[in-house]
Image (cartoon, rainbow, N blue to C red):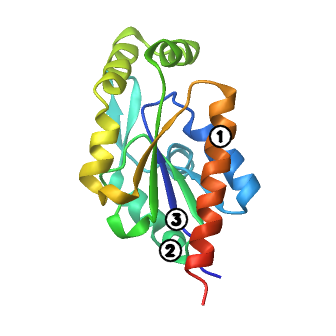
Amino acid sequence: MLLPNILLTGTPGVGKTTLGKELASRSGLKYINVGDLAREGQLYDGYDEEYECPILDEDRVVDELENQMSEGGVIVDYHGCDFFPERWFHIVFVLQADNSVLYKRLETRGYNEKKLKDNIQCEIFQVLYEEALASYKEEIVHQLPSNKPEDLEDNINQILKWIEQWIKDHSS
């Protein structure tokens, strides 16, 4: 059976991982957190002192994911999206959160002041939504609110319906 590939993207702290894990458990699709994948495989290209984090080696990440993506049935979670091949994804969801909600979530993670401010600005200016629109066909890019528990449930149900319809449309 053919299964779709889904990209969950958005500013850090919007709820991609929570949504992705729950979606995978309810849909049977495979969940891949690119940050975890990079950590496990040491897929880095240096360290960013300013943001106090490793720099992702995007080419190695793409190489690492290529086979799984071509098989289908994968949910990918990452805050960037412009380096993934366009052919990988059947749909892209950009999660978004109100600044006050996002600020609290990032503060809880212990982000330094610069990282906090830059991520909030990134959300205000919809940087990742714009990146998704520039990287994929507009009709497959969708925004989802991610502020409260009800949003999570609504998003899961909406995406599960989409998966079900996609499978129907692509089965012979």
Picture layout, residue 159 above or below residue 49 = below
Please, what is the three-letter code of the amino acid marked with disc 1? Asp
Q: Position of residue 145 (x, y in %)?
A: 51, 33
Q: Residue furthest right?
A: 26
Picture layout, residue 138 above or below residue 125 = below
Depth order, front residue of 16/32: 16
Q: Residues within 10 Å of mark 1 (few under 14, many from 20)?
A: some
Secondary structure under the numbered disc 3 in the rendered image: loop
What is the distance, in whole Å, between disc 2 and disc 3 at their CAs? 12 Å
Secondary structure under the numbered disc 2 in the rendered image: helix
Depth order, front residue of 140/80: 140
Task: Read off the residue under disc 3.
Answer: 5
Which quarter of the figure is the N terminus placed in? bottom right
Residue drawn 37% across and 19% down?
120
Sequence order check, earlier mark of 3 and 1 = 3
What is the distance, in whole Å, between disc 2 and disc 1 at their CAs? 31 Å
Sequence order check, earlier mark of 2 and 1 = 2
Of tags 2 and 1, which is closer to the observer? 1
Please, what is the three-letter code of the amino acid marked with disc 3? Asn
Task: Read off the residue under disc 2.
Answer: 67
Q: Residues within 10 Å of mark 2 (few under 14, many from 20)?
A: few
Please, what is the three-letter code of the amino acid marked with disc 2? Asn
Does the residue at mark 3 contact the one at mark 1 (Cβ under 8 Å)?
A: no
